[in-house]
Image (cartoon, rainbow, N blue to C red):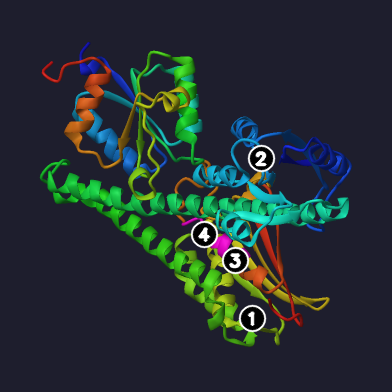
Amino acid sequence: MKPENITILIVDDDQDYLFQLQAKVRQFGFNTITADGQREAERLIEKVKPDLAIVDLMMEKEDSGFILCYKIKKKYPDVPIIIATGVAAETGIAFDIHDESNRQWIKADRFLEKGIRSELLKEEIFKLLSLTTKE
Amino acid sequence: MSILKILVVDDEPGIRSGVTRILRNFRVDYPFMEEPIEFEVMEAPTGEAGITIIETNIPDILLLDNKLPGIQGIEVLEYIKKKKKDIIVVMITSYASLELAVKATSDGAYDFIPKPFTPQELKSSIENITKRVFLKKMTNKLQDAGKKIRFTFLSILSHELKAPLNAIEGYLKMTKERQLGPNLEDYDGIIDRSLDRIRGMRNLILDLLDLTRVESGKAKRNMADVDLLKVARTAIDTMRPYAIQREVDIELQGVAPLILQADEEEIEIIFNNLVSNAIKYNKEGGTVACNIHKNEGCMIIQVEDSGIGMSQNDIEKIFDDFVRIKNEDTKNISGSGLGLSIVKKLVDNYSGKIEVTSAPGQGSIFKVIIPINQPCL
């Protein structure tokens, strides 16, 4: 599969972050669809099945991202999900996706810091989609 | 019904069954407790058996004889100390020497009951301990709640402060990498967005300062006669350019004198927040009516707008820290989510209250009611 045939869903309630992330992901060559919150994303996935989703953690509520993840996975178990969060470092909240007990309730495949470098984000997306960056 | 578990370790069967009998129908009541506390007694004839029970079914209170057939009571006490078990230990012994008492106390024994004891002696000792356990549990619970609130506040604050930084940084990077091409004009949009985010962040910091002042700065309050109409007029004048930009008309109603004993800066914060919200969440061409009057020993400040309104569900949340109602109507409105929480805390300080009347699309009425003659907290 080629990037231009792949659609990535981006969900964030911060319109600027959403705009910037969309620009980045498009630069990688993917198609994008966006939602500005959990509710809009839920409406969107009723109509479209994305190939991958990048979801913000704190939106309408502090845990909107988790709930949205759960709903996406329930509908499309095979769609990889990245949770993007800005809260980890300062407050000491560390969600370790590799910890089995966390993996059970956090339905995301990756946790990434917001503000992550483009190349790193690209690498993670390609890995989750089992694409090679050389393609 | 709350139950405390008591373990009696004594080699004399009479003592064990005596304790069980005395405490079977014993209840401790305390004015702060919602319900009386009852006791469940477990028995062990040796220190070893006692430790086994401690390991499987940890008691709240341990009644411990020192002179035991195997290991001594003092060794059980050392074990509890070493394992950092949260148990209150009372030594029951007829062989209490000063030396033993000192050793036992330094190892964490809470009390001594001489043997033989009367039912009353046992009950009064257990009653004291129960109150202590209760207070300790309450303190722990309150501290946990306090920590959790603080933690939530800090994590949201960190999110709110980082979000604009991330956005601005992102735009600067896009500009640096000329991602929108060589034409400078093409960057106007993202520069405007960056400026908006900086403005939002500055407002958040100002609100945080207000909040800190409300929560901790009571020592600096300057109580004096405050002319509410004057403060309202200043707030409205400050907000006027913003109102004009949004094509919202503001009206002030009130018959002088309307004087309240208060800290003028605090009253300014209340007006600023209510009036700016009334403009911010209004519709183009809408109105804001600010009305101040006296009613039954209270000062009433009412700010009514013809704006987007909100649901009953939203009204219940808006006075909490960082709460912003997110929907189609509000998605382009920025705010720290602290304004009404600050207003609420201020009004509470004046023993006042706030009433909100609103419905989606129907505008909102915020009514602040402050007693005129009541001393402030």
Number of other residues with Cα within 10 Å of mark 2, as a class: few under 14, some 14 to 19, many 20 or more: some
Tag 1 and tag 3 share a subunit: yes
Tell me where the magenta segment starts and ends, as one range.
B336-344
Residue B339 is inside the magenta segment: yes
Residue B162 can be seen, yes or no:
yes
Number of other residues with Cα within 10 Å of mark 1, as a class: few under 14, some 14 to 19, many 20 or more: many
Dot 4: element: loop
The x, y position of residue B120, in whole percent, is 87, 54
Identify the chain of the residue marked 1, using the numbered disc in the image. B
The x, y position of residue B170, in whole percent, is 24, 46
Q: Which mark is first along the chain, 2 or 1?
A: 2
**A7 with respect to B339 (left or right):** left
Number of the front mark, 1 or 3: 3
x 77%, y 40%: residue: B3
Of A20 and B5, the residue lying toward us: B5
Tag 4 and tag 2 share a subunit: yes
Q: Which residue is mark 4?
A: B338
The x, y position of residue A86, in whole percent, is 35, 43
Q: Does the residue at mark 3 contact the one at mark 2 (Cβ under 8 Å)?
A: no
Q: Which residue is mark 3?
A: B343
Q: Does the residue at mark 4 contact the one at mark 2 (Cβ under 8 Å)?
A: no
